[in-house]
Image (cartoon, rainbow, N blue to C red):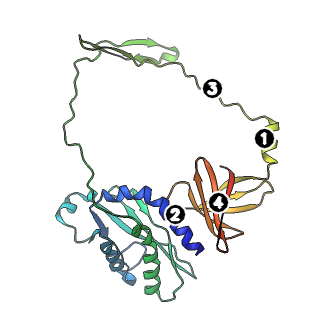
Amino acid sequence: MKNLFVIVFVLTVFRGYSQGNLNEYKYIIVPKKFDAFRKENQYKTSTLVKYLFTQKGFNTVYDDALPKDLNSDRCLGLIVSVKDESSMLNTKASLVLKDCSSQEVLSTLTGKSKVKEFEDAYKEAITEAFGTIQALDYTYAPKERNSEPITVSFKNDVKDMEKKREPKNKVNEVVVKQVATPEEQVYKSNEPVVSKIEKAVPLSKEATNNEKNDSNILYAQEIPNGFQLVDSTPKIRLKLLRTSIPDVYTVEHDKDNGVVYKKDGKWFLEYFIGDTLKTEELNIKF
């Protein structure tokens, strides 16, 4: 029940970030051999991934059998990979979708399995990871491209540029844009203006001491897969593990697993005690 809550919560937030992006792509490209494995279609991972995407309504193809339009324009498709994070005790896997520039478009939650047989274990873990994509209502909607030619006019270009010399032989160019017609009168200067930004004033010792003495403040210290939150003792109170969604973390702490997320500029922790959902506001200093 608790793990289901975490998955549903993250998927709900995740859906808003990913839905529009996936709809722009016509194909999902499945490698016959994933980098995470030594052999082609090892543990039937390639056939499983292709089956899952096809069942969900995606136009799914193998990387050695691209249709004509995809072969000429690889940006029509996303290539899927399996990220294997298995340990000695558990099989763990997630799916990552990248575009033609190798930029990550979507990364699923990690699916887990404790089954000892590898083929069954990867089937369970990958199917669970695919639940992230299962929650999306994919419909191919081609991204509109502006096919009109760009017109550049030099009619009102500035003919002269005033140059002012500054110390150390640096030259500032003052660019003035003018339009002078019976219908329109415009004068715009792009000359640099003096900045009004002031230097930040350091906190006073008294303010710094007050912050250190506040036992409710949790200080974020970066770790390889996220952050650990420590109090002023210092004692590690929480560990935040990154997800593919900005400002949403899964959590390890002394009560139970949960979720930390940012809403309206504030940080909140949600977790279950028994069947009761608890919500706590956190004061985090990054």
Q: Is residue 193 above or below residue 21?
A: above
- Measuring 70% from the left and 30% from the top, which residue is drawn there? 201
Depth check: 155 or 273 in front? 273
Residue 214 seen anywhere in this rendered image of the structure? yes
Task: Point out the frontmost of discs 3 and 2.
Answer: 2
Q: Earlier in the sequence, mark 2 or mark 4?
A: 2
* Quadrant showing the N terminus: bottom right
- Measuring 39% from the left and 56% from the top, which residue is drawn there? 103
Q: Which residue is mark 1?
A: 208
Q: Earlier in the sequence, mark 4 or mark 1?
A: 1
**Residue 198 numbered tag:** 3
Q: Which residue is mark 2?
A: 10
Q: Position of residue 266 (x, y in %)?
A: 63, 49
Q: Earlier in the sequence, mark 4 or mark 3?
A: 3
| Label 3 element class | loop
Q: Which residue is mark 4?
A: 269
| Label 1 element class | helix
Q: Earlier in the sequence, mark 2 or mark 1?
A: 2
| Label 2 element class | helix
Q: Amino acid at mark 4?
A: Leu
Q: Amino acid at mark 2?
A: Val
| Label 4 element class | strand
Q: CA distance from mark 2 to mark 4?
A: 13 Å
